[in-house]
Image: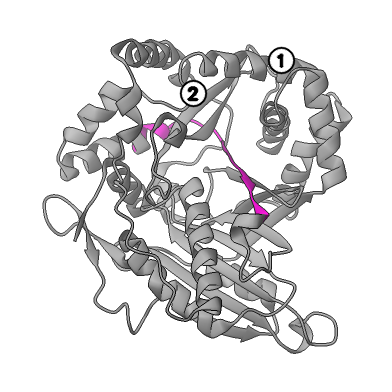
Amino acid sequence: MIATEFQDQVTGIFMNFGATGYLYLVLDFPTPLDAGALALATRRLLDAEPVLGCRFDDSEETPVWRRRADLDTNSGFALIETGDIEGETTKFVATVFDPRTGDNMAVRLLRRTGDGAIGDGAGGDRLILCVSHTVADGGAAVMVLERLATLYSGIVADPAFQLPPNPAPRDSFGWLANFSLRDKMKVVRRDLGELPRLMRRQQGFLRSRAQFAATPRVRPILARMVVPAERLATIDAAAKAHGLSRNDMLLGGFARAFVAFCHGDPGRPLQIIMPVNLRRYAETESRPAICNLGGISNIFIEPNLGKAFGDTVQRVDRDMERQRKSFMGAANPYTAKMLASLSYARKRRTLDRMMEAGMKKPVPPTFTNVGRIQERRIRFAGTAPTGVTLYGTPLPLPIVVVAVVEYAGSLILTMPYYQDDYPPGAVEHFLADIVNSIETNRDE
């Protein structure tokens, strides 16, 4: 049994509302993997990171992570031979997750057969790593992938290879240890200053809580866009010329593309929710714990998007500078601590009221930039994937979440969704428009 942390409980509550789910890393390999070694690596990873071998048990007053009794018979690994690699991927990514009964981690090795094979029938495999958001954010999911690669490589060389159990703490507030009282008050002042803007009606999609709950979870689509190295270099050069970061440029493109996507008014302000990795504030171990350690930044683009992309990105830069000066991603530490001290039942009621109130106005979109996945850290017995994609669980309107990763010089943008929520091609056009807005600098 492992104690649940504050962020575990909060994420678990949102899963009960159907507002989050699994994280999936999809890797394509140029040659087949050793299925036996991968199965063994999956099982040993559940011992190396014990929380991954647990389920969320909230049957008592305080939830705990309870170790599963079926780990030796059901490690979460499966080899699937298929002639429809994309269809099998979509089916798996659309799995409806219940934190009480679902596995915290699962691995699928998809082996191409028949028409689904590469070239003449010989070819590589697709590996899908699935991690519950109750135990891991995007950064931690990448850590799980790295450790799976380490175990696989070690087992191929020596079948007895294993990693010892990770003793690193999963403390949701570990990042606060290095914050002085002055630091904390700076965050509080910033968050208090944001309150009036958070109360305004934002641009976005609108759907009541009842409509959201009643949405049928059918016909999932995995929208994906790849920005190749040469296009990415153009974006980076433009960012450097203006003294901006790539993320600033992407946020500017995301803002303009989203307003067009939701048929909003470019003359109105826009709020973007941007998850931020809080590990950089903490003194982490060489093998940090698998946990949720993400904060939220509310990026405000105002008074409006501006006529051209250059106007938008200037507004982004201004607000990002405000965030950087006040510990970007760090939320009000006193409010979070107070919420953490409440009983689980009161947390559920509080967050339920927050969600109910939040869906009485348009929901701001979320832009998650996980960053660069290093090829050398995810080599499986010396073989690196040719491509890596990050997906979240498909979520119905009004929630819009775009995830971004960089791998092997390319940028991959994704947004899983339900086909019934949008006109054909709308989401794919939205993803393309994020980058097109940057490159063409056109007026919208």
The residue tagged 2 is: 328
Tell me what residue is drawn at x 40 percent, y 53 percent. Answer: 18
Q: Nearer the viewer, residue 49 or 324?
A: 49
Amino acid type shown at disc 2: Met
CA–CA distance between discs 2 and 1?
Answer: 18 Å
Label 2, residues with CA under 10 Å away: few <14, some 14-19, many ≥20: many
The residue tagged 1 is: 314
Q: Where does the N terminus fall, quadrant-wise?
A: bottom left
Q: Answer with left or right where residue 294 lies relative to residue 380.
A: left
* Magenta-colored stretch includes residue 360: yes
Q: Which of 228 and 399 is in front in this view?
A: 228
Residue 234, percent from left and from top: 86, 34
Label 1, residues with CA under 10 Å away: few <14, some 14-19, many ≥20: some
Tell me what residue is drawn at x 64 percent, y 65 percent. Answer: 27
Amino acid type shown at disc 1: Gln
* Magenta-colored stretch includes residue 180: no
Location of residue 225 with respect to 356 vertically, above or below: below
Quarter holding residue 264: top right
Q: Which of marks 2 and 1 is nearer the N terminus?
A: 1
Tell me what residue is drawn at x 62 percent, y 71 percent. Answer: 381
Q: Is residue 369 visible?
A: yes
* Secondary structure type for disc 1: helix
Chain part drawn in magenta: 356-375
Q: Where does the C terminus fall, quadrant-wise?
A: top right
Residue 269, percent from left and from top: 61, 18
Marks 2 and 1 in Cβ contact (< 8 Å): no
Residue positioned most to the left? 61
